Image (spheres, rainbow, N blue to C red):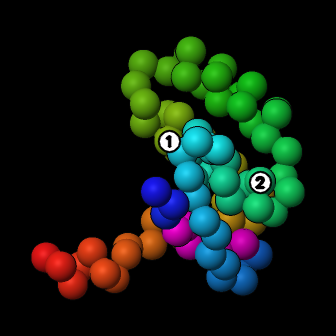
Amino acid sequence: MARRVGYTFKNQYKEINFVYDKFHDIYEAVAAAEGIDLTRYHAMEAQVAMTSKGSQAVKDYRHKEFARFGFSDIHFIRDESAQDES
């Protein structure tokens, strides 16, 4: 099932489709949509994960790096039809 992801890239709001078959997480999807190579990012993320004791350091690194790339407010878009059925 395809999901929608909303994000702001360099002060411009955008939406894309997202499926787990193609991307590991929404951060990879938005980077691919904007043509950003994450090779160096993944290497550093792995080093942070190996040297930190918890997952919070990895999350902090991810948020800071994607902010440096120009991203903000990366989130899944709630399906309005699913809300109506509840």
19, above or below 59, in the image? below
11, above or below 57, in the image? below
Asked whether the viewer can see residue 72, the reply is no
72, above or below 42, in the image? below
State yes or no: residue 28 in magenta.
Answer: no
Occupied quadrant, residue 37: top right
Amino acid type shown at disc 2: Ala
* Residue positioned 21% across, 84% down in the render: 84
Residue range in magenta is 4-9
Crowding at mark 2 (Cα within 10 Å: few <14, some 14-19, many 20+): few
* Residue positioned 82% across, 33% down in the render: 40
Locate residue 32 relative to residue 58 in the image: left or right: right
Asked whether the viewer can see residue 71, the reply is yes
Outermost residue toward the front? 1
Res. 75 mark: none
Q: Contact (CB < 8 A) between labels 1 and 2?
A: no
Amino acid type shown at disc 1: Lys
Foreground of the two, 30 or 12: 30
Crowding at mark 1 (Cα within 10 Å: few <14, some 14-19, many 20+): some
* Residue positioned 27% across, 75% down in the render: 82
Cα distance, mark 1 to mark 2? 19 Å
- The mark that comes first in sequence, 1 or 2, is 2
Occupied quadrant, residue 45: top right
Locate the C terminus by quadrant: bottom left
> Magenta span: helix, strand or loop, mainly?
strand
Locate residue 58 relative to residue 56 in the image: left or right: right
Foreground of the two, 35 or 61: 35
Secondary structure of residue under mark 1: helix
Q: Which residue is mark 2?
A: 32
Locate residue 34 relative to residue 71 in the image: left or right: right
Foreground of the two, 48 or 85: 85
Q: Which residue is mark 1?
A: 59
